[in-house]
């Protein structure tokens, strides 16, 4: 446990490609060879997270594992709490390509200690930030609005159209661990007493859309969001200051049944890859590949912006990444033959 905690402390801290139609049926020998190739890695279930970066990474790594390492990959729906809980209790899915540890640290630490899960390194160099934000133009007009308390004193500036007289805070969608945290922190900061409602945007797309719409119309909005994301690369938002992060009370703030949440704020987010120990043991080369997957915030932001600009699916974005970012993903794999197999499949 202590070793794992120390490792995390130092971590300052994506369905197969569309194949061209063929005019022949593979021979029995070819089919047997393909089966034998896949048998070495076996079936791999990959959590396709409900946010863009996690979904893209799941598709990228599914393609590389399938075409480069002969794995029989399957993408399954993923979200922070249900995925970590399932991996800890059932060792399923085999792999989660992007997982923020802050909200599920206790579950992960216990599963690692029990030998059920392995942490395969950080995803983004430079870490990630989770926070509460308001637009820069709002702060320019109201310079005093740099703290949570100052914003809570002005529900009139952030009106809830469905509940006149109240303010609105855009929290995380249901199923995201940050929704639990936001609810507990809102209680600690006195949102209800200040006249603010917590609004569930329904999805990650809904949350991003609300912020983008407000920004383009130069309207105030008070919301949770995180980096790295294309949204905060396009729109300048101000991170609100709150109480200093307190590790001792954070564990309670992360629980659904926290009886007495205290004022706190998100720590720097640790974003890692989680792999079931069973999969890591039976497919060491695949595990080594997963452990090497890493990129900068600028790199993932540029990929996310391309997806948004082209209205592409996560799978289409994964293909774009494999075609345009060979310099990056080629260093993740074990040897040049894997690179050639993946390139031949595109």
Image (cartoon, helix red, strand yellow):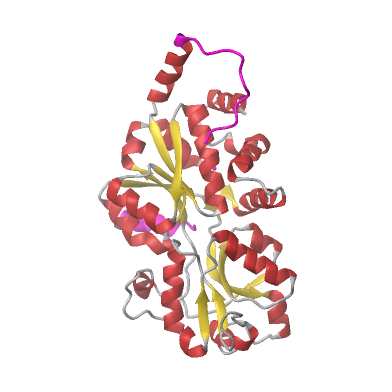
Q: Residue at x 54, y 23 (%)?
A: 337
From this view, report whether residue 323 is shown above or below residue 254: above
Left or right relative to 232: residue 277: left
Q: Main secondary structure of the magenta part?
A: loop
Pick the residue in front: 312 or 9: 312
From this view, report whether residue 91 is shown above or below residue 172: above
In the image, is residue 257 part of the stretch drawn in magenta?
no
State which quadrant residue 9 falls in.
Answer: bottom left
> From the image, which quarter does the C terminus lie in?
top right
Left or right relative to 154: residue 81: left
Pick the residue in front: 181 or 13: 181
> From the image, which quarter does the N terminus lie in?
bottom left
From this view, report whether residue 18 is shown above or below residue 314: above
From this view, report whether residue 214 is shown above or below residue 279: below
Q: Residue at x 61, y 50 (%)?
A: 300
Left or right relative to 131: residue 116: left
Q: Residue furthest left?
A: 114
Left or right relative to 280: residue 160: right
Q: Residue furthest front?
A: 162
- Measured as percent of width and height from the top left, residue 240 is found at 58, 77
State which quadrant residue 225 falls in.
Answer: bottom right
């Amino acid at each position: 446990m202590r070793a794992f905690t120390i490792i995390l402390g130092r971590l300052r801290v994506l369905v197969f490609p569309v194949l061209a139609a063929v005019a022949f049926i593979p021979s029995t020998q070819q089919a047997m060879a393909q089966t034998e190739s896949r048998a070495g890695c076996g079936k791999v279930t990959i959590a396709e997270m409900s946010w863009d970066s996690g979904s893209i990474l799941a598709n990228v790594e599914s393609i590389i594992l399938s075409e480069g390492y002969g794995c029989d990959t399957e993408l399954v729906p993923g979200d922070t709490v249900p995925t970590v809980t399932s991996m800890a209790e059932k060792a399923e899915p085999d792999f989660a390509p992007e997982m923020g540890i802050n909200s599920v640290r206790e579950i992960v630490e216990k599963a690692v200690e029990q030998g059920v899960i392995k942490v395969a390194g950080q995803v983004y160099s430079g870490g990630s930030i989770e926070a509460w934000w308001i637009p820069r133009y709002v702060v320019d007009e109201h310079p005093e609005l740099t703290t949570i308390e100052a914003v809570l004193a002005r529900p009139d500036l952030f009106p809830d159209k469905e509940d006149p007289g109240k303010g609105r805070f855009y929290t995380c969608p249901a199923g995201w661990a940050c929704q639990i945290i936001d609810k507990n922190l809102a209680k600690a900061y006195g949102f209800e007493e200040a006249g603010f409602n917590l609004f569930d945007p329904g999805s990650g797309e809904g949350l991003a859309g609300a912020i983008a719409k407000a920004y383009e119309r130069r309207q105030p909005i008070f919301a949770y969001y995180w980096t790295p994301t294309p949204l905060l690369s396009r729109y300048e938002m101000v991170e609100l200051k709150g109480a200093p992060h307190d590790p001792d009370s954070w564990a309670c703030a992360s629980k659904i049944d926290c009886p007495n949440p205290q004022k706190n704020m998100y720590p720097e987010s640790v974003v890692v890859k989680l792999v079931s120990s069973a999969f890591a043991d039976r497919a060491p080369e695949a595990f080594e590949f997963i452990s090497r997957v890493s990129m900068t915030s600028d790199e993932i932001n540029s990929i996310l912006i391309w997806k948004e600009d082209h209205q592409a699916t996560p799978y289409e974005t994964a293909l774009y990444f494999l075609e345009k970012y060979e310099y990056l993903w080629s260093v993740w794999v074990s040897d040049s033959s894997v690179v050639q197999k993946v390139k031949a499949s595109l």
